[in-house]
Amino acid sequence: MRPTTEVELSEMIRSTAATVVVRGGGTRALGRAEGPVLETGGLAGVRLYEPGALTLVARAGTPLAEIEALLAGERQRLAFEVPDLRGLLGRDGASTIGGVVAANASGPRRVQAGACRDSLLGVRFVDGAGMVVKNGGRVMKNVTGYDLVKLMAGSRGTLGVLTEVSLRVQARPEAEVTLVADCGEKAGGIEAGLAALRSALGSPFEVSGAACAGGRALLRVEGMAGSVAYRAAALRKRLGGAWGEAADGPALWAAVRDVSAFAGRAGSVWRLVVTPSEAGRIVTTLSGEAVIDWGGGLIWLLTEAGQGAAVRAAVGRHGHATLARASEGDAGTALHPPELPAVARLSSGLRAAFDPRVIFAQGGKI
Amino acid sequence: MDMPAPSQAILDQKPAIVAALRQVLPADAVIDAPEETRAYECDALSAYACPPLAVVLPRTTEEIAAALKTCHQMGVPVVPRGSGTSLAGGALPTADCVVLGIGRMNRVLEVDYDNRFIRVEAGRTNLAVTGAVEEDGFFYAPDPSSQLACAIAGNIAMNSGGAHCLKYGVTTNNLLGVTLVQMDGTVVEIGGPWMEAGGLDLLGVICGSEGQLGVVTEATLRILPKPEGARPVLVAFGSNEVAGACVSDIIKAGILPVAIEFMDRPCIRACEAFAHAGYPDCEALLIIEVEGSEAEIAEQLARIKAIALSHQPLEFREAADEDQARRIWLGRKSAFGAMGQINDYMCLDGTIPVSSLPHVLRRIGEMSAEFGLDVGNVFHAGDGNMHPLILYDANKPGDLARCEAFGAEILKLCVEVSGCLTGEHGVGIEKRDLMAVQFAAQDLEAQMRVKDVFDPTWLLNPAKVFPLAASAGRRAG
Ligand SMILES: Cc1cc2nc3c(=O)[nH]c(=O)nc-3n(C[C@H](O)[C@H](O)[C@H](O)COP(=O)(O)OP(=O)(O)OC[C@H]3O[C@@H](n4cnc5c(N)ncnc54)[C@H](O)[C@@H]3O)c2cc1C
C-alpha cells in the first residue's frame, strides 16, 4: 500500500482488516513486525520553509536527504543531528522525515539542543480507526490543548501513520571545535574520560557534544568564531593537559552519531539510556565494546548473544535498555524492558485508544 | 463564560465527603468553612470566582493518593491547584469540587550537579528551584514572570514558558520525570535523571495537560550551569514593521539571543509612566539579551548592532554597567503592573509566525478602534508569543463582555495566520470555547481519548480545556 494523500491513507486504513507495518524508508525499523507494508513514500514534499522563522513543514514521506539539502542551502540544519543507523542495523534505503520523527532519532547534540521531539512543532497523522488528526502547529510556543506532538515522536508507528510534520530548524554555526583526549579502553581511563565529560557539561561553556568511544573522549563546542575559540580554550584549562584539538572533528562525531564502530560486526547491539554518572560502572561491569554518547547518558553496547539479563541488571533502576540489533542467539530476547505496571496500563490504554483494532503491527511495540 | 451547573447530589453530600476526607488526612489538611474556602475561589483570571465545596492541603504523595481515591469513590470532581497564578482560569473551582492544593509539598528532595538535575516536591515555587542551586552556579531555565509565586506543579500543568525560553526551551524541554497520582489514587513514576523516559512519551503528554490527567506531586528537572554573564540592549524603532523585520533578520543570521522582547507604543508609554525606566518615546522597542563571557557578549552584540543599524533605529542603547542593564529590563518587567495601574486588563497569549508580526499588530490596532478598548502589546518576539493586554473597566457594565469579544477576535486572528490560541498560559476556561477555531472535531476527540485513558470518569478538572459541548458526553453529572 502506498497512499499519495491523507484521504487515501485514511480509506486504506479503514478498509484494511489485516495488521499493517508502517514504513518510511525502512532504515530504522527496530522490532520484529510482520504484515503487509504501508509505505509513506507517496506522501512527500516540503510544504513550507521559512528560514527567517526557523520553521519547516514537510509531508512525512519526504526523504531526509532532501530536507537536509534544502536546509543546507540556507545555512541551516536540524538541531538534533539525525543518526544514520543503516550501517549499524544492516539496512539500505533512504530515511524519511516521518521515520526520523517516529523513532525520535537524536544524535550527539541532544545534550545541548534536545531530542527530535524537542524540535517537533506539529504533526498530522491518521490513527488506527482512519481518523485524521492534527496536533501542535508551526509556531515555536504552543500549549493549545494536549501535546500529542510529543506522544507521536518516538511512537514508532504504533499509534498512527504520520502524514506531516513541522520542525523548528537551527542556523548552522560558523565555527566548531572538537577537543579530544586519549583515555584508553581500561576501566579507570573510561571513568576518567566520562568524569571530564560531565565536568565540561557542568561548565558554562555550552558543550554541544560529549562522547567516549574507541579509547578517546570527545567534546565539541559550536558557535561564532570568537566564542568557540574562547570556550575551547576555557575547557582545556578546566580539564587539564591531556586535551587537544582534533583535526577531523566532523568525522569523529559522525562516527559516534551513527555508531559506525559496530557496523558489519557480529553480535547483538544494546542501546542503554542511563543516569550519566552510572555509565562508567555499567560499561565496565558488562562484557563487550561500548560507544558512549550524551556525556554518559547513552550507551551503545556490542556484546555476544545472551547478555540481556546481565545488561538489564547492570542498568537496574538507573535507566532502561533496548535491544537495538539482535544477533541470532538473541532472537527470543525481549527488545524492551518490562514497564512498571502503572505505566504499562497507561501505555496500552493509549495504544488501544488510537489503534482500537490493533492494525498497526505491534512487533516493534514500545 | 459558562461553567456547568454544580451537582446537587454532591452539594447535599458535603458533610459525608468532608468526613471521609478527614478520615484519610490530618485534621489541618481539610478546609470546609466558607470563610476559608473563599481564599481558593479563583486564580489570576479573577473575573471568575466560585468557592469550592472543600479544600485539601496534603503533605505527601500518599496523602494525595488517599484524598483522590476518596473523591473518586464518592464521584467528587477535583481541581488541582499550585499557587493560583493561572491567567486562563485553569485552577478555577466549581461549587461541587474539592480543590487539591499542592503548596505544602515544597521540599527539595535531591540535588545532583554531576548529572545536572534537581528533584523537588511539585509545590515548590519556580524561583525557589533556582534558589536551591544558584549558589553553586546552576539555574532552572524556564522563567515565567510569575516565578516568585507560581509552583512547579502549575508550570508542568501549563507547560509554562518565560522570557528566556528562546534559547532554553519551555517546561517540557526541561522536565525529566514526574510522580503522578491518577484520579483513582494510582501512583505512577515516569522518567528519572536520564534523558529519555523510554516507551511512549507519557511525560510529554502530561506536561501541558492542565491538571486533567493526574496530580503531579514530584518532579525531576534539568538544571543548567549559569552563563558567565548576560547583557541587554534596547533598540527603538519608528514602526512595528521595521522592528519585526529586525527580529527576523537577527534570527535568520543565526544569532540566538536568550531573549528578544517587543513592546509597542501604548505599552511603552504605560511602563514609562509607571516605572520611569527612561525608555525612548517611540512606536516599537526591542529588548535583546545575550549571554556569555565578556568577549562573547561583545561579539554577539556587535552582530546584533550591525543588523539593527541596517534598519535605521531611532536609538540603539547598550548597557554600560549593571545599573543600566537593570533599567533596560525595568520597564518590561513591570509591564503587567503598569497596565494594571491604568485599568483592569485581560492578558492574551496567542502565538503567531514571526513573519506575521506587522500584519497582526496592524489588525489589533484597527480592532482596538472598533471595540473602543485600548490595548498594549508586550511579548516574546523571538518565538512569536504575543501578549496583548486589553484594558477594560470591571465596574462598567458590559465592558468585560466587550473585552472578551475583542480578545476572541485577536485569538482568531492568531489562528488565521497559522498561529495558535495560547503559547504559554494554557486554555483553562478562558480559551476553552475557542478551541473549535483551531481544532476540528476529530482533533479534539483524539485529545479527549487521552483523558479517557488517564481519568476514565472525567473527575479531574473536568470543565476545562475542551468546549463544554464537546466534553458533555464524557463529564459526569
Ligand atoms: C503576573 C503574571 C505573570 C505571568 N507570567 C507568565 C509567563 O511569563 N509565562 C507563563 O508561562 N505563564 C505566566 N503566567 C501564568 C501562570 O503563572 C502560569 O500558568 C503558572 O505555571 C501557573 O502556576 P501555578 O502554580 O500558579 O498554578 P495554578 O494557577 O494553581 O494552576 C494552573 C493549572 O495547573 C493545574 N495544577 C496545579 N497543580 C497541579 C498539580 N499538582 N498536578 C496537576 N495539575 C496541577 C491546575 O489545575 C491548573 O489547571 C503569569 C501569571 C501572572 C499572574
Image: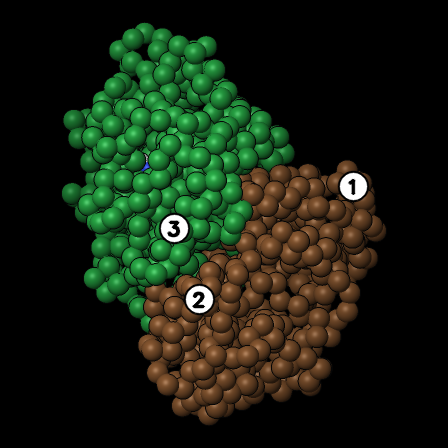
Chain colours: A brown, B green
The residue where tag 3 is placed is B301
Q: Amino acid at mark 2?
A: Val
Q: Position of residue A117 (x, y in %)?
A: 54, 54
Label 2 sits on a secondary structure element that is helix
Residue B469 visible in rendering? yes
Mark 1 belongs to chain? A
Separation (CA) of disc 1 from disc 3: 47 Å
- Number of other residues with Cα within 10 Å of mark 2, as a class: few under 14, some 14 to 19, many 20 or more: many
**Is A15 situated left or right of B132 in this image?**
right
The residue where tag 2 is placed is A228
Quadrant assignment for ligand 1: top left
- Number of other residues with Cα within 10 Å of mark 1, as a class: few under 14, some 14 to 19, many 20 or more: some
**Is B395 situated left or right of A138 in this image?**
left
| Residue at left offset 29%, top offset 8% | B396
Q: Amino acid at mark 1?
A: Thr
| Residue at left offset 83%, top offset 51% | A1
Label 3 sits on a secondary structure element that is helix
Q: Amino acid at mark 3?
A: Leu
Q: Is residue B91 above or below residue B322?
A: above
The residue where tag 1 is placed is A5
Q: Is residue B134 above or below residue B305?
A: below
Choose between B333 and B475: the one closer to the eye: B333
Furthest-top residue in view? B397
Residue A207: quadrant of the picture: bottom left
Separation (CA) of disc 2 from disc 3: 16 Å
Q: Position of residue B292 (x, y in %)?
A: 34, 59
